[in-house]
Image: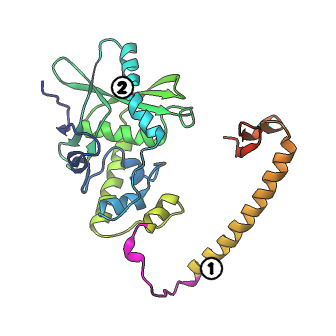
Amino acid sequence: MTIHTPTGVLLGSYTPGTPEWEQARGGLCITATEIAAVMNLSPWSNPFVLWHKKSGLPVPPFVVTSQVEWGNRLEPAVAAKWQDEHEGYCVEPTGTWRHRHRDWQRATPDRILTTSQGAVTELLEVKTSPTGEGWENGVPLHYYCQIQWQLDTLGLQRCHVAVLISGHDYREHVVEYDETDAKLMRERAERFLDSVRNGQRPDIDASTSTYDTLRRQVDRFTAEDVEIPGPIASRYEVTHQQLKAAETEHTHAKSLLLDALGGGRNATHLGRRIAYRTAHEDGTTRSLQPAR
């Protein structure tokens, strides 16, 4: 059965990490997982890091954390739960798609919802989260961007979202296609790709991922002395001194708090938890953590 959508062209189904998968997502294109970085809304990346990646320059490697691993392992189970709750839908895995008229616009939805004739009617995204943070009022913004990009690529109007929080809290959401938001993202993506073609690097921001990307640019290491502009040198020296002072003060504050906590676990103030203690088996303190 041939799968078809209003504007999507199926490139194929690839195993993540294989050369075929990298090729389908590589080059001067923007995927659904990258559009939030273009919009500077991603918790994992940003325009600076993505620009280096698209320019063929070194970037920090993707790390398969335990959260990522278990998210992948649980995806089929969460998708099956959604299908159990919605009789009449045909839920199928899919592959990587491109827009029919914009080859640079790519998307790999988690699941597609099809008719018996092979027409894709809607999408299903499957997520897992260790906490409910960000899901209080619907779908987090970076996932919203991802979903709008998928809908815009395939020419569809609705995406269902199934999320499993803390391993037991199952929730569902629906995201409708928003033409205005999709147009804004396309314009930003096209400007971003132009900046890659023209060698116009984004500004350096304060994120750790930007710093880690700069650390990986091997051509920056020489044995020569380099004269640094005054504002940059002053900012580094002043903030370093401030950091050392803040660390010393924070250590003092932790000592005072730990002493005041005594044998308790949770430190509260006016009914609000401000920190908690984790302990070794012998009862000694392992760490003092700020409340989330």
Q: Is residue 270 left or right of residue 98?
A: right
Residue at the far front: name it.
Answer: 282
> Picture coordinates of residue 151 (x, y %)?
31, 36
Instruction: Give me the residue at 12% from left, 24% from top.
Output: 1
In this orientation, which residue lies closer to the viewer: 13 or 70? Answer: 70
Q: Is residue 172 magenta?
A: no
Quick one: label 2, few (<14), some, or many (20+) residues within 10 Å? some
> Picture coordinates of residue 60 (x, y %)?
41, 58
Residue 47, numbered label: none
Q: Is residue 248 left or right of residue 27?
A: right
Q: Write down the region rendered in magenta.
A: 216-230
Vertical side of 166 occupied by 55: above or below: below
Residue at the far top: name it.
Answer: 87
> Picture coordinates of residue 122 (x, y %)?
30, 26
The mark total stands at 2
Residue ID for mark 1: 234
Amino acid type for the residue under numbered disc 2: Pro
Residue 76, numbered label: 2
Lower sequence index among marks 1 and 2: 2
Tag 1, which secondary structure? helix
Instruction: Give me the residue at 24% from left, 56% from top.
Output: 27
Amino acid type for the residue under numbered disc 1: Ser
Vertical side of 174 occupied by 103: above or below: below
Viewer-nearest of discs 1 and 2: 2
Q: In terms of secondary structure, what is the magenta stretch mainly?
A: loop
> Picture coordinates of residue 174 (x, y %)?
42, 27
In this orientation, which residue lies closer to the viewer: 56 or 3? Answer: 56
Query: What's the CA distance linking mark 1 and mark 2?
Result: 53 Å
